[in-house]
Image (cartoon, rainbow, N blue to C red):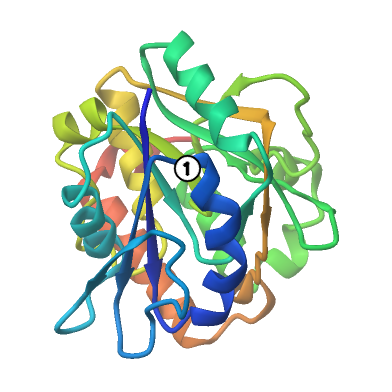
């Protein structure tokens, strides 16, 4: 199955210089969406560049890139996500063998090779309050919170997941067409949770495939500091998700 890759750059020219050479041999086409001036790569490595007249939300940029491609499988890949050789093929082969898999996520590792826990359960009110408020200083070490985010579960074989971090995800176009793509109302953060939740409700599977390996620089800025602009973006995404899916307010 052919694979198209979408990369959104918001001033990430330096990151693209590392990720595009690793990505190009593994996919059939690449579209780089340059969200702001100076975002296009110096060396495109065969990628097609789409430049915005004005900045868009991350989800809207993904939709624009997806609309520029036609492959049945679409890889949405952060500029700082570097797929290791054979990773995209491993994800594509898994999806081909599992026709109801709409989302496949690789194993993510830090630049130094340390494992990144990228599987997650769908958010709950209690979990979000602890995760995104000073309460996490009291409850974050608890086993229950760690279990909620799969922080200690390093799977060695493919396993189903509620959702996965959006650093690098392979998506099935049939699913995207059915769901209407990403919700452009998510400025940044939460767009992959919303997509996976709508996919789950529509009967599409989401799988974590650790045989595919992607090196990813996960800054986790909103985890380290409580009151930043990114924290506000997180909360805006949380509120949008709750308005769209109020049944999650009662989930445990």
Vertical comparison of 138 with 54: above or below: above
Q: Is residue 169 left or right of residue 201?
A: right
Vertical comparison of 49 with 121: above or below: below
Vertical comparison of 53 with 151: above or below: below
Q: Secondary structure at mark 1?
A: strand
Identify the residue at the far bottom of this view: 37
Q: Point out residue 200 in the picture as x, y percentages from the top left corner.
A: 34, 26
* Callout count: 1
Closer to the camera in the image, 213 or 2: 2
Q: What residue is at 52 percent from the left and 61 percent from the top?
A: 20
- Tell me which corner region of the image, top left, top right, bottom left or bottom right, holds residue 185: bottom left
- The N terminus lies in which quarter of the figure? top left
- Tell me which corner region of the image, top left, top right, bottom left or bottom right, holds residue 82: bottom right
Closer to the camera in the image, 27 or 126: 27
Q: Is residue 28 visible?
A: yes
Q: Point out residue 62 in the picture as x, y percentages from the top left corner.
A: 28, 57
Q: What residue is at 80 percent from the left and 42 percent from the top?
A: 143
Closer to the camera in the image, 182 or 76: 76
| Crowding near the residue tagged with mark 1, few <14, some 14–19, many ≥20 C-alpha atoms within 10 Å | many
Q: Point out residue 196 in the picture as x, y percentages from the top left corner.
A: 37, 37
Q: Is residue 203 left or right of residue 9?
A: left
Q: Which residue is mark 1?
A: 169
Q: What residue is at 54 percent from the left and 51 percent from the top?
A: 23
Q: What residue is at 84 percent from the left and 53 percent from the top?
A: 114
Q: Is residue 126 visible?
A: no
Closer to the camera in the image, 217 or 136: 217
């Amino acid at each position: 199955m052919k694979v198209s890759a979408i990369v959104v750059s918001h001033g990430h020219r330096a990151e693209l210089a590392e990720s595009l050479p690793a990505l190009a041999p593994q996919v059939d086409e690449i579209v780089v969406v340059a969200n702001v001036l100076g975002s296009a790569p110096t060396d495109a490595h065969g990628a097609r560049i789409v430049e915005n007249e004005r900045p868009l939300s991350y989800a809207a940029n993904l939709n624009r890139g997806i609309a520029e491609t036609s492959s049945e499988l679409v890889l949405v890949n952060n500029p700082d996500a570097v797929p290791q050789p054979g990773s995209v093929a491993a994800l594509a082969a898994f999806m081909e063998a599992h026709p109801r898999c709409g989302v496949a996520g690789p194993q993510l590792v830090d630049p130094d090779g340390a494992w990144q826990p990228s599987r997650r359960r769908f958010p709950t009110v209690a979990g979000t309050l602890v995760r995104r408020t000073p309460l996490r200083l009291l409850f974050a070490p608890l086993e229950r919170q760690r279990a909620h985010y799969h922080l200690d579960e390093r799977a060695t074989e493919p396993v189903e997941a509620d959702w996965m971090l959006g650093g690098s995800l392979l998506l099935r176009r049939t699913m995207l067409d059915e769901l209407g793509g990403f919700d452009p109302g998510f400025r940044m953060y939460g767009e992959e949770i919303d997509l996976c939740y709508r996919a789950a409700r529509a009967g599409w599977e989401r799988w974590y495939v650790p045989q595919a390996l992607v090196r990813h620089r996960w800054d986790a800025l909103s985890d380290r500091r409580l009151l930043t602009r990114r924290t506000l973006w997180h909360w805006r995404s949380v509120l949008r998700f709750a308005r769209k899916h109020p049944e999650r307010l009662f989930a445990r």
